[in-house]
Amino acid sequence: MCGIAGIMYKDSRSTGLAPIGEELIKMLETMVHRGHDSAGVTVAGESLDSDLLIRIWADESAPAEETIARAKETVMSAGGAIVSAEARDSYLRLTANYEGDVPRLAEALLQTPGVVLHSIGEVSEVIKDVGTPVVMDERHGISRLSGTHGVGHVRMATESRVDISHAHPFWAYPFTDVTVVHNGQLTNYHGMKRDFESRGHHFQTENDSELIAVYLADKLAGGVSLDTALEASVDDLDGTFTYLVSTRDGMGYAKDRWAAKPLVLMETDSVVALASEEVALRSVFTDELERTEPQEHEVMTWSA
Amino acid sequence: MVSLDASELTTRELNKQIKALAEEGVDEIVITNPAARHNLAVGIRRPCNIKIEGSVGYYAASQLDGPEISIDGNAGWALGENLMSGKISLSRSAGASVAASMRGGEVFVGGNAGARAGISMKGGTLLVAGDSGFLTGFMMQKGRIIVCGSIGEAAGDSMYEGTIYVGGEVGSLGADSRYEEPGEDELIELWAELEQNGVAGRPRFRKIVSEKKLYHYDTLERFERTLI
């Protein structure tokens, strides 16, 4: 069992950015009974004064300061100009101006010893940690992040180990701003993973949800729309799943053919919110609300 | 009438107080500010009258024997699970597995029901004013599911006994279920039930029953077996 949440303010580009970080934390905290192991969010549609926002975690193989210094060097030697660098514990939030090829930069960072790359975005970032949403917020200051939309996750691990790398969201490497949160299990994970590996893809974790991100990235690389990629996924992925995807300016959900994992949806003219449970929607929207329950084999997307 | 503010109580404390009030014989218990929380008003085994003013979460009004509960809002998964007797009325939509394994009484859903409505039903009536989802009546063994709107895919999959009535479209029949024409008397009774529950219209119901090709069980309760 896991809990997923998503929220988008459709007009926030013109009416002012919304408190996405704070609202995602509220929604996730009310669903903490669905997973205490780790938590994570993507805050998207942020207002940045740089080309790229890079989120890095320094693993335990070396002192964090050394890894963080190496990561900065990698960005600079790839041709990036660092605009800001904010280090908290073993985490680095880096904004940089960079006009080169993002996959090349991502590859260079992945080759840097100790660096675990959580996301590269033009308008979004992934923050994930072990523990509960409130604890994560205290450590990372997620509540202060504004944007147009975002997705989040609380994890109860069922298929791979509990650590920061196996927390959600998963970035659809190397596509900027495409991230996934997932509740469920993929039963054709190993077969599909082998297919991707035989085509040269390197997986960063053993979490089956990473496959969804990789799968969507592959579809998008083939030039299909997000809608089409989501529609294909409900046939290609086997198992019980409900997942949310966040892109540069969009958000969507896909639900398996068995309707096995919950999701409720609330939509008005200005906002759309999704969560595993209605109690999460009520943590942000306190009045009684009209909500629907997406059914089996369904996908839907929205744009901000 | 006694009113309890759910926002001031833990779920355990709230349920304890509801049970105690039911034992005392209080004629009406009103729950305010439920805020879609889980496990509200569960495990009550006495007739009593409970009004919940707002949406509830998972397993609301489950494990009941006797109460009449009305909920003004939505419900999460498994509303009214294992109802033995009494009535649950929900003004809006229910999540998946509404009335799972119910054995008696009535569950009324004013909006739509999610997937697996009436899964493994063993008696009583589930009435849905709107549509119901995938696998409605999955493995039902007794009782009636009445859906005024449409049903999704695999309706009545692997049902052993019992009846599903549907007023609208059916996505597909599940394994081992088939259509049957309801009699005029049956329709008149159903329409009267709709009227009692404030549901407008007189849908021309179709009936889904077990085809019994996978039927390898008797349908008697333990006490019924002693009678033959």
Image (cartoon, coloured by chain):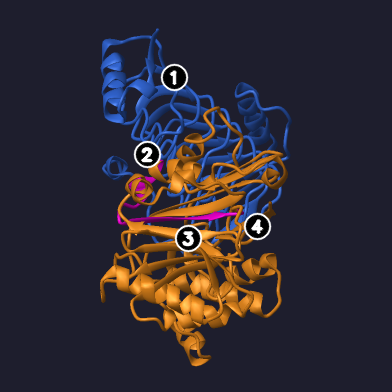
Q: Secondary structure at mark 1?
A: strand
Amino acid at circle 1: Thr
Task: Look at label 4 and name its amino acid.
Answer: Gly
**Which residue does the numbered mark 3 point to in the structure image?**
A126
Q: Of label 3 and label 4, which has the lower sequence position? A: 3
Tell me the kind of residue under disc 3: Val
Q: Tag 4, which chain?
A: A
Measured Cα–Cα span from mark 4 to mark 1: 37 Å
Label ID, residue A250: 4
Give the magenta-colored segment's residue range.
A30-45
Q: Do the numbered discs 3 and 4 sit on residues whose CB atoms are within 8 Å? A: no
Badge 4 and badge 1 both on one subunit: no
A44 horizontally vs A228: left or right = left
- Colour representing chain B: blue
- Whole-number angstrom distance, CA of label 3 to CA of label 2: 42 Å
Q: From the image, tell me which residue sits under label 1.
A: B32
Whole-percent x and y of residue A145? 51, 47
Does the magenta portion include A38?
yes
Q: Secondary structure at mark 4?
A: strand
Q: Quadrant of the N terminus of chain A?
A: bottom left
Q: Nearer the viewer, residue B106 or B10?
A: B10
Which residue is rendered at x = 45% and y = 38% of the image? A279
* Residue type marked 2: Asn
Q: Is residue B166 above or below residue A108?
A: above
Q: Nearer the viewer, residue B156 or A98?
A: A98
Q: Look at the numbered disc 2 and give the secondary structure of its residue.
A: loop
Look at the image and give the colour of chain A: orange
Discs 3/4, front = 3
Q: Is residue A149 visible?
A: yes
